[in-house]
Amino acid sequence: MRFPAKPLGLAVASVIFVFGCGKEAPPPPPPKAEAPAAPPPKPSVTVKIGHVAPLTGPQAHLGKDNENGARLAIEEANAKKMEIGGAVVSFELLGEDDQADPKQGTTVAQKLIDAKVNGVIGHLNSGTTIPASKLYADAGIPQISPSATNPKYTQQGFKTAYRVMANDEQQGKVLGGYAIQQLAAKNIAIVDDRTAYGQGVADEFEKAAVAGGAKIVAREFTNDKATDFAAILTKIKSKKPDLVMYGGMDAQAGPMAQQLKKLGIKAKMIFADGGCTTEFHKLAGDAAEGHYCSLPGVPLEKMPGGTAFKEKYAKRFNVDIQLYAPYSYDAANVMIDAMKRANSAEPAKYLAELPKTAFDGVTAKITFDEKGDVKDGAITLYQAKGGKWDPLETIGGAAPAQPAAMDGMAGMGGMAPMGGMSSMGGTAGMGGMSISPPPAAAAPAEKK
Amino acid sequence: MDTFIQQIINGLVLGSIYALVALGYTMVYGILGLINFAHGEVVMIGALTALTVIKLLANSGLPGVVVVLLGLLAAIPACMALGFTIERVAYRPLRHAPRLAPLITAIGVSIVLQQLAMIFWGRSYHAFPPILPASGRDIGGAHIMDLQIVIVLLAAAIMAGLMLLINKTRLGRAMRATAENPQIAGLMGVNINAIISATFLIGSALAAVAGVMVSANYSIAHYHMGFILGLKAFTAAVLGGIGNLPGAMLGGVLLGLIESLGAGYVGDLTGGFLGSHYQDVFAFFVLILVLVFRPSGLMGEKVSERA
C-alpha cells in the first residue's frame, strides 16, 4: 500500500543529487593531500565532504537549514584558499537527502562512502544517524552530527562518531528536573513520535520526572508525519495533566499546540530542541503562547559568534536560521580544523586529530570527550512569549550528566584513545569495533 | 463519558472528511474501474490553493468566515480543472490499455503533482491563519468547536446532494448507466467522455472541500498531506465497498470513528500493551476482518449497481 513512497523518494533524491552536484567542476582527483614534499607549484586537490539531512518531507526546512550551515563553512574555507599538505584545497559539499527515514539514511550513507567522501556532516535525525554511523565507522570515515542527540549514537563505540550538541540524556534530565522544580508539575502526560530522537528524549524526561516525584498520567504516541492529534489529546484531557511533554519535532508540536487549545486543555506543553524553532510559532499561531522548550547550547544571541553568524547566514541565503545551522556550521569547521592540524584530508590521518579538537565555534568552544560527545553541553530553557522563544535560564555548562555517562562507558575506555588509526590497519580495528555495539547499547540501561 | 463523546466527535469530523475523499475514489472506480491514486494529491492542491487565497485575504478586514469561503471558491474550480486535466491527459489515452497501465499512470500523476506542489508551495508546513472564530460549546462535558459542527453538517449536506444528483437527475442516470456498461450506455446516446469528465469534476470538487476542511480543522497544510489522507480514504472506500456511494460514506465515517476510538481506548483496553501508535493497525485490522467476511466491502454488491 505504500508503493508511491519509494519511487517518489528515489526521484526526489536523484533530483536533489543532480541539483546539488550540478556545478561539479572537473572530476575531482583522488584526495592525495598528504606528501608535504610535493614541489610542483601549488597543486590543488578537491576534498569532498558529505552532508546528509532530510531535504524533503516534514523536516525539509530543518534539513535545508543544516545544509546551509555546512555550505557556509565550506564556502568560507574555500575563499581562504587553505593549504593542506602543500596543496590548495577546495572543499566540495555533497548534499544528500535521507528524508528522515532510517532506511534511506543508510542508502545515502553508502552512496557517500562509494563517492569516497573524506568526511560526513550529519545526519540531522538520531534515527538516521545511528544506523548510518555503522557504515561510516566500517569505512573509517569521520562523521560529525550537528543535531543527532540520541545518546546511543556515541555509545556504540565507533571511533568515527562525533557530535557538537549535548545529547538527549542531558536534555531529558534537564527538562524533567525543570518540570518538577520550576513548573511544579505533579501529573504529567507524555507523547512521543516513536522516532529514536522523540522516544529517547521522552524516556529520559520520564525517568527524571518520576525520580522527582511526578506521576505520569498518560503515555501516548503519534508519528513524525501525523497532523491529527485529536484522539490522543482527548484521552490526555481526561487524565487532567498539568503539563504535557512532547518528544518530537516542530511539524507536530505546532499543530498539537493548536489542537490542545481547541480541545480546551489548559496544561502547557514542554518539549526539547526539535520543537524549539521559529517554525513552531508559525504553525501554532496564537496557541504557541506559554509553552516551554529546551535547546542544547546557549541562545544564538548569547553564542560567542551568534550575532555575526546570523548576519552572515542571512546575507548568504536570504532566509532566517531555522535551528541547527550554527551547529552544522561548527561541525563542518571542526572537521576542516582537524584536517588542517593533521595536515591531511585523509580520513585515517585527521581522525586522530579530532579528539584533540579545541575549536572556538559559533555555538561554544568545542571539545570532545572520549565517546565523541561535546563536552560541557549547556542546555537553555525557553518559553513562548509574543511569537518568540524567550530564554528563561541556562542549565549546565559544567557537564552535569557527563561523569555518570563516562562511568557507564568504562568498558569502552580502552578503545577510546584514538591514536592508532593512522594506517589502513584501521579497517581490521573497525571490524573488532563493530562487535562492540551490543554491550555499548546495554550501557545506558545499566546506568539507570 | 465526556471523553467518549469527545472521541466520537473527533471520529465524526475525521470520518466526514474521509468520506468526502472516499467518494472521489469510489465514483471513479465505479465508472472506470480505475483506482485514481492521484485523488489524494487533488485534495492537497485544493487545501494549498485555498490556503494561499486565505493568507492573501487574511488581513483584508473581511470576516474570517467570508475569507475561508472565498478560499474554498478558489479551490473548487482549481481542483475541478486539475481533475479534468488529469483525466484528459493521463487516463483517457489509456482507457483501453491493460488495467495496470492506468494504475501506474495514476501513481505517476500523484508523484508529479506532489513534486509540483513542493516546488510551488515549498517544503514547509503551512499554518492555517487563525481567522475562524474559535468559539465552541460544551456538550456533556465535551468541548466541541463550531468549526467541527460545520464540517460534519456540511459534509452530510454535500453527500445528500450528491445522492440526489446521482439518483434523481439526468446526469446521475447517465452516470449510473455508464457505470453499468459504458458501451451500451454509449449506444443509448450517452456521451461517455462527457460523463467521465463530469465524474472527475464532481470528485475533484468534493476533494477541494475536503482539503479545506482538513487544513482548517487541523490548522495545517503541506505538500505531502495528500498521500496518507488519500490512502486512508481509499481504505474507507474499500471498507464500504468500492464503487458504492453510500458505502464510501459509511466506510469513511466508520474509519474515522475506529481510528479515534482506537487511539483513545486501545491502550486502556489492553492494559498498556498496545498504545495509541497502534491506531492505524487497529483501523486496518478492522478492514481485514470486514474483507474476510464480506470481500466486496460492507455495502458492496457482487456485480451490478456500481456507482
Image (cartoon, helix red, strand yellow):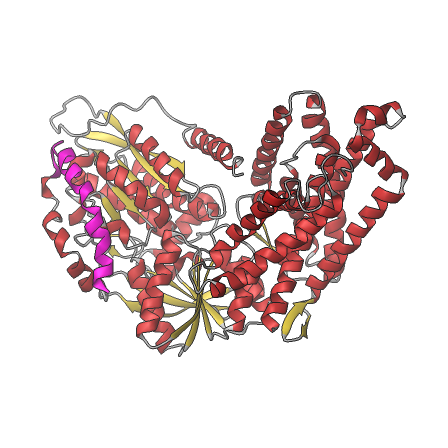
Who's the residue at 32% across and 69% down the image?
Answer: A208
Q: Where B125 sits versus A205, above or below?
A: above
The quadrant in which the N terminus of chain A is found is top right
**Measured from the top left, where is residue A96 in percent x and y?**
39, 36
Q: Main secondary structure of the magenta part?
A: helix
**Measured from the top left, where is residue B280 in percent x and y?**
53, 51
Does residue B173 appear left or right of residue A422 in this picture? right
The quadrant in which the C terminus of chain A is found is bottom left
Who's the residue at 46% across and 48% down the image?
Answer: A59
- Res A222 visible: no
**Measured from the top left, where is residue A187 in percent x and y?**
43, 75
Q: Where A34 sits versus B158, above or below?
A: above
Foreground of the two, B56 or A188: A188
Q: What stretch is highlighted in magenta?
A: A421-448
Query: Is B145 included in the stretch rendered in magenta?
Result: no
Does residue B108 appear left or right of residue B157 in this picture? left
Foreground of the two, A400 or A220: A220
**Measured from the top left, where is residue A30 in percent x and y?**
24, 24
- Res A209 visible: yes
Q: In which quarter of the image is residue B22?
A: top right
Who's the residue at 30% across and 43% down the image?
Answer: A332
